[in-house]
Amino acid sequence: GNSVTQMEGPVTLSEEAFLTINCTYTATGYPSLFWYVQYPGEGLQLLLKATKADDKGSNKGFEATYRKETTSFHLEKGSVQVSDSAVYFCALSDRTGGSYIPTFGRGTSLIVHP
Amino acid sequence: NAGVTQTPKFRVLKTGQSMTLLCAQDMNHEYMYWYRQDPGMGLRLIHYSVGEGTTAKGEVPDGYNVSRLKKQNFLLGLESAAPSQTSVYFCASSYGLAGTNEQFFGPGTRLTVL
């Protein structure tokens, strides 16, 4: 079956530091890949996505590249801000096998200090 | 557009009581989902629906029932609440096979069972 593995948190950084959150996946077909963000007290919202190999999704300074050869979709940001403190979820959606239901990682908490 | 809305936002129940959580979406999405989120557990899928009149079990369906009588609404029922069902519940919707299946989430319902 499909699965998503994220690095465990919390990840604690100082403002303006470089961020990487690792995400690897297994899938039976050719999935679409997503990063969602959850700010405190809110629901998840889509941060970025990629639908085919070597695609780069980007939004709000965050980037992730769909690496089929390493089955990875690592999230990066060059300079984090306090307002980026949130929980980040990696997810995939795979059309093959008859089920298109998304699979989520367990989430990585990011804490950014001033 | 309101997106995905959930009713109520907060609820406190006593063990054995019943309740229904309502999810509504105005994006004409085919797929709808109910998740629960507990500390350290990430998101866990309870039930989902791939179209009006259809429902299916997710990862943790026991103790819950659902109905999708109208395309825009997805109801989650607890027939006899237990303290183990204390959680934050999120509804989500997506286009399903018509798109990349990115999900749109509601703001959540915080349920406490005493």
Image (cartoon, coloured by chain):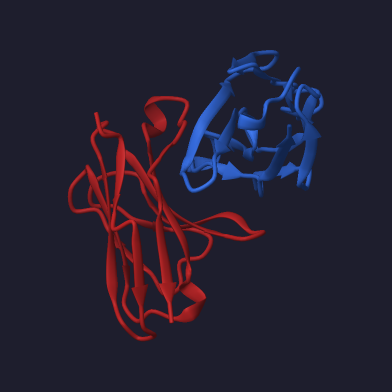
Chain colours: A blue, B red
Considering every residue shown, the one lying at the far left of the view is B70
Q: Quadrant of the C terminus of chain B?
A: bottom left
Where is residue A4 drawn, in percent x and y? 69, 42
In percent of the image, x 47 and y 44: which residue is there? A42
Q: Between A12 and A63, which is closer to the camera in this rendering?
A: A12
Horizontal placement of B19 versus A101: left or right? left
In percent of the image, x 39 and y 46: which residue is there? B107
Where is residue B32 drawn, in percent x and y? 35, 45
Task: Answer above or below: position of A29 versus B68.
Answer: above
Where is residue A68 drawn, in percent x and y? 74, 23
* Residue A5, quarter of picture: top right
Horizontal placement of B105 versus A51: left or right? left
* Residue B61, quarter of picture: bottom left
Considering every residue shown, the one lying at the far bottom of the view is B16
Tell how many labels.
0
Residue A62 at least partly seen = yes
* Residue A85, quarter of picture: top right
Task: Answer above or below: position of A66 versus B26.
Answer: above
Horizontal placement of A11 versus B61: left or right? right
Residue A93 at least partly seen = no
